[in-house]
Amino acid sequence: MQNSWTKTSVQLLDTVSRPYTGEVLVPFSLDEAYARQCAKNETLPPLVHLWRHERALVLGARDAKLPYAGDAISELRMKGYETAVRQSGGAAVPLGPGVVNLSLVMPAGATDLNPEPFFVHMVELIRTALGTDRARMSSGEVVGAYCPGSYDLAIDGLKFCGIAQRRLTRAVAVQAFVNVEGSGCAYGEQVLSFYQVAAKGTTVQNFPQVQPERMASLAELGVPGGVSGFAARIREALMTCEESAITVMNSCPTWLEEEAEKALGTLKGRNLLVGS
């Protein structure tokens, strides 16, 4: 792992043992709130946020503009899925008990507009967490995967992780989903089903052409440990930087909860027209 945490403290907020069940924008509001504080105070330490949601499908901005996105979202909600459009880039991603969400939120220079170093931080953190399996991991777009991007992470050609980025003027939030357990193909079928409804009738292929078999989970790829093991691996990866101080939090501090409430209102406002 690149020693990007050297000589700094890192806050680790790990809530994977208690998956969210309601509004899926809540964990995103924590990232947003911390990023806003980083933008005001460059001395704040980076935040590493680990979380899960029981049942949701999170969309990218372009997904919400598909001609029948409202119908597709209504169908998902009738099936018990939480839905929302996230601030960071990317496209539709299903969340469930086997999917770990990992965020890196940190200050960034106002003129530091190159997104690549922040993507690399995330890639290297996950690579280190994979331990002996790290040599099998590759980075680069996986054709046919959902939420495709230049920093797709794959093993044996099958994508298990996607990464997106949210930039503020003086802060950045890098957000990754990691399929740790479950069926990657089943996750892919959920996303494909959404696009089959949302993009019905359009002749413009401005949405991912999902091939469910291009996805996998770490469990399917032979990486042991499950969700709790992956969270522990992330913690251990952070601690490999001997000059870093890691503060582990199993619950959100009160001040961040209060700031997240404010951010949540803004995020909800931007989602009002989606699926209406």
Image: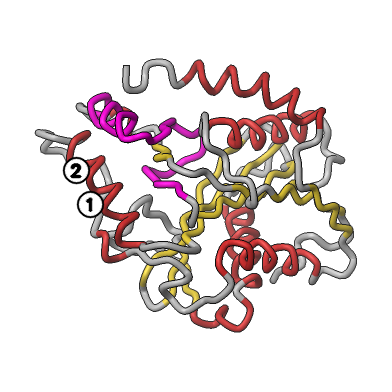
Residue 190 x/y as whole percent: 29, 48
Q: Amino acid at mark 2?
A: Gln
Quick one: label 1, few (<14), some, or many (20+) residues within 10 Å?
some
Against 153, is 132 above or below? Answer: below
Closer to viewer: mark 1 or mark 2? 1
Residue 217 x/y as whole percent: 43, 66
Quick one: label 2, few (<14), some, or many (20+) residues within 10 Å?
few
Q: Residue at x 65, y 72 (%)?
A: 128
Q: Is residue 200 left or right of residue 162?
A: left
Dividing the picture into quadrants, the one containing residue 252 is top right
Against 220, is 33 above or below? Answer: above
Residue 134 x/y as whole percent: 57, 78
Q: Is residue 165 left or right of residue 34?
A: left
Residue range (magenta): 69-96
Which residue is denoted by mark 2 in the rendering? 205
Of residues 62 and 54, the one drawn nearer to the viewer in this rendering: 54
Q: Residue at x 30, y 57 (%)?
A: 186
Q: Is residue 130 magenta?
A: no
Which residue is denoted by mark 1 in the rendering? 209
Find out whether the residues at labels 1 and 2 contact each other: C-beta distance under 8 Å.
Answer: yes
Quarter of the figure that contains the C terminus: top left
Element marked by disc 2: loop
**Alpha carbon separation for disc pair 1 and 2:** 8 Å
Q: Residue at x 13, y 35 (%)?
A: 200
Q: Residue at x 36, y 62 (%)?
A: 184
Against 261, is 125 above or below? Answer: below
Q: Amino acid at mark 1?
A: Gln
Q: Is residue 58 left or right of residue 62?
A: right
